[in-house]
Amino acid sequence: MTRAEENYLKAMYQLSAGKNQRVSTTALAERLETKPSSATDMLQKLHDKSMVKYTRYKGAQLSPEGRHIASQIVRKHRLWEVFLVEKLAFGWDQVHDIAEQLEHIKSPDLVERLDVFLGCPKVDPHGDPIPDDKGNIEQINKILLCEQEPNSRCVLMGIKDTDDAFLKYLSQKNIKLGSLITVLDKEPFDESMTVVIDQKTHFISKIISTNIYVQPR
Amino acid sequence: MTRAEENYLKAMYQLSAGKNQRVSTTALAERLETKPSSATDMLQKLHDKSMVKYTRYKGAQLSPEGRHIASQIVRKHRLWEVFLVEKLAFGWDQVHDIAEQLEHIKSPDLVERLDVFLGCPKVDPHGDPIPDDKGNIEQINKILLCEQEPNSRCVLMGIKDTDDAFLKYLSQKNIKLGSLITVLDKEPFDESMTVVIDQKTHFISKIISTNIYVQPR
DNA sequence: ATAATTTTTTAGACAAGACTAAAATTATAG
DNA sequence: CTATAATTTTAGTCTTGTCTAAAAAATTAT
Ligand SMILES: [Mn+2]
Ligand SMILES: [Mn+2]
Ligand SMILES: [Mn+2]
Ligand SMILES: [Mn+2]
């Protein structure tokens, strides 16, 4: 697998979120910041290598093998992110681009040892689950903060859209994975919330509460 | 710099060992397991980018900038090798190929943090010096074991030709960086040696003693 | 000094991956 | 059900990095 092929497989894996739906040429091209014609080319190549099932004008779907390869790229990406944050003290907003490169290092032995070195983590620094070497993901029960009722407690379990600016916003306010959140009030008008996070009171908009995964306590 | 360009610069850096001599097209091609015509192509490209000074039919020489870039690839290669051996418990015969990939990861911040994480090592697992971020190398005073006189002591400081098979041979006999070596006898006929390494007696051929760097004690 | 040999370069081709412009197909709207 | 719009594919071009075969230059030997 070349780097480009791996990136296409990973993009398909992430676009067909959890389930294994078909992915359209345009969606794929958009995700990879390339043109639909390039995506078509690649899908045909991946079809010939039986990594995807591609039907002209109908989009493509990962084959079991393509799906497995994609899961291992994601596994590597997230393990490296853990390494960068836990061992090299990077901030969670700094690691994605570097992991984007590291995920393509080829050495099954390396992945295994890295996993052990990191203590076999189950989630990456943004709370996203790390697939195991078979591609299985341990489902963690989490909901969006915006769905929490007033006067309830929960724990921050992940970030939905791990945009750099948003990650910076959160860490600047010292909000992080594992933070204890108490919802005090929810404004019916704009659904903004008053919450206490680790003893500090914050007023957060709907946009923000829709981007934070929590586990009720 | 693309990966191929980086590999050419690194190869030139290593071929012009220490000094900054001119490198021939054929030598470069051989080192990179490619054809001389490909090397010519690349040298012309690198000349246009002023990474090397290339003269037709006369070979090429690294420019100060090309030399610096090359040194940083070597720096990354060796730092990653330290990481793999020290942190992930790889054997010193298993790390070169993986480092060959890792050396191309682009992030100045990453290199700096990795260096600190590893305790700013001065040599890699084979005893080769690690250039600093300016490209400077701390010269370590070392000679070949074959040049040691009988009835002298020395410490193993490095391996000259870090061939996988040779590295395996050494570690299988528990001979490693820092091992204390006492030369008991040197056969005048074939220059084979009887040595004690860490309390154990070994008979070693000239070929082997010419491949081990030591520092006299 | 000339001939033979070796080294190096040029010319032309190819594969991977991307792009643009045009054609084909599918989806949507009236 | 047809006309228009949107999506997708094809055809042709480009860049990077490689190769082979042939030409040119430099070396070595006679
Ligand atoms: Mn990421
Ligand atoms: Mn990637
Ligand atoms: Mn190495
Ligand atoms: Mn390399």
Image (cartoon, coloured by chain):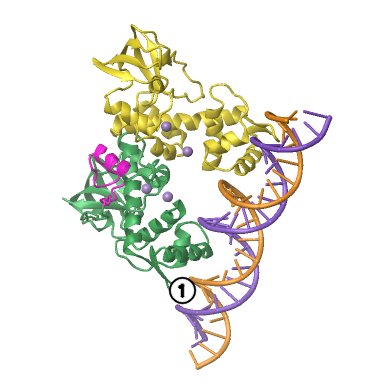
Chain colours: A green, B yellow, C purple, D orange
For the stretch drawn in magenta, what is the main secondary structure? Answer: loop
Residue in the image at 35% along x and 51% along y: A73
How many numbered dots are placed on residues in this image?
A: 1
Let me know if residue A122 is in the magenta part: yes
Image location of residue B114, percent across then percent down: 38, 31
Residue B77 sits in quarter: top left
Residue in the image at 36% along x and 26% along y: B125
Tell me if residue A39 comes above or below residue B128 in the rendering: below
Which residue is nearer to you in this view: D16 or A164? D16
Few, some or many residues within 10 Å of mark 1 (<14, 14–19, 20+): few
Is A214 left or right of A33, judged from the image as shown? left
Image location of residue A208, percent across then percent down: 34, 52
Is B42 left or right of A198, judged from the image as shown? right
Which element is circle 1 on?
loop
Residue A174 sits in quarter: top left
Which residue is nearer to you in this view: B142 or C24? B142
Say which chain tag 1 marks: A
Amino acid identity at mark 1:
Arg
Q: Quadrant of the N terminus of chain B?
A: top right
Is B105 left or right of B91, judged from the image as shown? right
Image location of residue A48, percent across then percent down: 43, 66
Is any part of residue A215 visible from this angle? yes
For label 1, the residue is: A56
Is any part of residue B2 visible from this angle? no
Q: Which residues are magenta?
A: A109-133
Image location of residue A192, percent across then percent down: 31, 54
Let me know if residue B8 is in the magenta part: no
